Image (cartoon, rainbow, N blue to C red):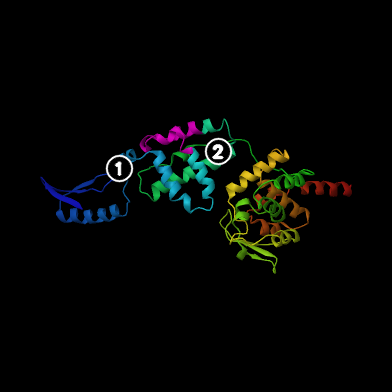
Amino acid sequence: MATIRKRKAKWQVQIRRSGQRLISRSFHQKRDAELWARQMEVQADRNEFARHPKALESYTLGELVKRYRDTVCARKRCHDYERTLLNAFLRHPLCSKRLSDVSASDFAAYRDERLQTIQPSSLKRQLSPLHHLFEIARDEWGLPIEANPLDKVRVTGSSQRRERRLKQGEFEELIEAAGYCQNPHVIPIIRLAIETGMRRGEIVSIRWEDLDLEKRSLFIPHSKNGHSRTIPLTNGAISIFQRLSRLSEQIFPTTTNAFQLNWQRAKKRAEIDDLHFHDLRHEAISRFFEMGLTAPEVASISGHRDMRMLFRYAHPLRIKISRKLEKGR
C-alpha cells in the first residue's frame, strides 16, 4: 500500500514493494498525491518498476542454474542434453558466486578457459542455455537483472562446417561393430539415419502411431526447428520397420544418451575416427541430391526451412557439375 503523509507544506507519497526500489514523490495538493499513488501502485503490481539490486545478493548462480534445470529445462525436448551440460557447469567455481557479483568478465574468463579444450561451435551450444537462463530470470522470475551478462561475451572462431561423408567400406564396418552392442536398436537406428536423414533425437522419439506403412510415410511431430513434417519412406526404411518388434509405444524404446554411448563404442570397435552421428544425416541428404531430387523435395524430407542451410549438403553435386563441364568442352 502507498503511504501518504503531510510534510510541511507538501504531501509526500511512498510506495514500497518487497524486492523493489522505494518510490517516492511530493505534491502540493493531496488529491494529486492520491491520484499518483493509485497509478504507481498499479505499475508496481505489474512488476514494471526496477527491483532492488540487493535482491541478487540472496542467490548464487548455482541456485539459479538448478532452478532453470529443474523447471524450464525439464520441459524442453532436448532436456537430457541440456541437463548434462548444466550439471557439468554446476561443478565450476563460477556457480558459487552471488548473482550480484556475476559479470560479463566472469563469463569471458570462463569462455577463454573452455576454448582451451573445446571448439567455439561446441562452446556456443553450451552457453545457449545459460543465456536463456538469465532471460527467464529477468523476464519471468522478476530478478533485478539489468542486462544479460552473456550478451557481451563473444565466441569467435573459424567455421566448423563439416562435409564429412562415409568412406568406402565404413558403413559396413560400422554395422558389423554395432552388432556387438547389447542394445538391439543401434543397428536399425544407424540404418534408418542413412535412409531418412533424420536426426538422432527424432529417430529415438518416433512412435508406432506416427508410422503409416500403407502410405509409406512417417510423421515427425517434433523437430529441432519446432515444426512437424511428414516424410516419404524408401524401400530400405520400410524394410527396417517391418523387421522390428512392437515392444512399446516408441518404435525404439531407448534414450538418446544410451544410444550415444553405444554409438561411441561401435565407432571405437570399428576404428573409425572423426565421424559424428549427425554426419549420417549429411550422408543421407547428399545421397538425396545425387538421386536427382530437387532442393524443395529434399527440404520436405530433411525439414530444412532455410535453403542456405540445406545447400551446405549439396557439395557432392560439384563433382557432377565438373564432369558436365568437362563433357561440354
Residue 33 location in percent, x, y? 18, 53
Tell me if 28 is positioned left or right of 195 in this view. Answer: left
Most frequent secondary structure within the magenta stretch: helix
Relative depth, front residue between 209 and 32: 209
Is the residue marked by circle 1 packed among few (<14), some (14-19), or many (20+) residues within 10 Å?
some
Residue 123: assigned label:
2
Magenta stretch holds residue 98? yes
Magenta stretch holds residue 9? no
Relative depth, front residue between 30 and 157: 157
> Most extreme residue toward the left, as rendered?
8
Q: Is residue 305 visible?
A: no
Is 108 drawn above or below residue 287 in the view shown?
A: above
Mark 1 or mark 2, which has the lower sequence index? 1
Which of label 1 and label 2 is nearer to you? Answer: 2
Relative depth, front residue between 196 and 264: 264
Which secondary structure lies at badge 2?
helix
Q: Kindly identify the residue that appears in the image at 63 percent across and 51 percent down.
A: 200
Q: Which residue is mark 1?
A: 52
Residue 286: assigned label:
none
Q: In the rendered picture of this protein, how many numbered marks are placed on residues?
A: 2
Tell me if 267 is positioned left or right of 96 in this view. Answer: right
Which secondary structure lies at badge 1?
loop
Q: Amino acid at mark 2?
A: Leu
Question: Could you tell me how far apart the alpha carbons at marks 1 and 2 are, in whole angstroms?
Answer: 32 Å
Range of magenta residues? 89-110
Q: Amino acid at mark 1?
A: His
Residue 87 location in percent, x, y? 48, 41
Q: Is residue 84 visible?
A: yes
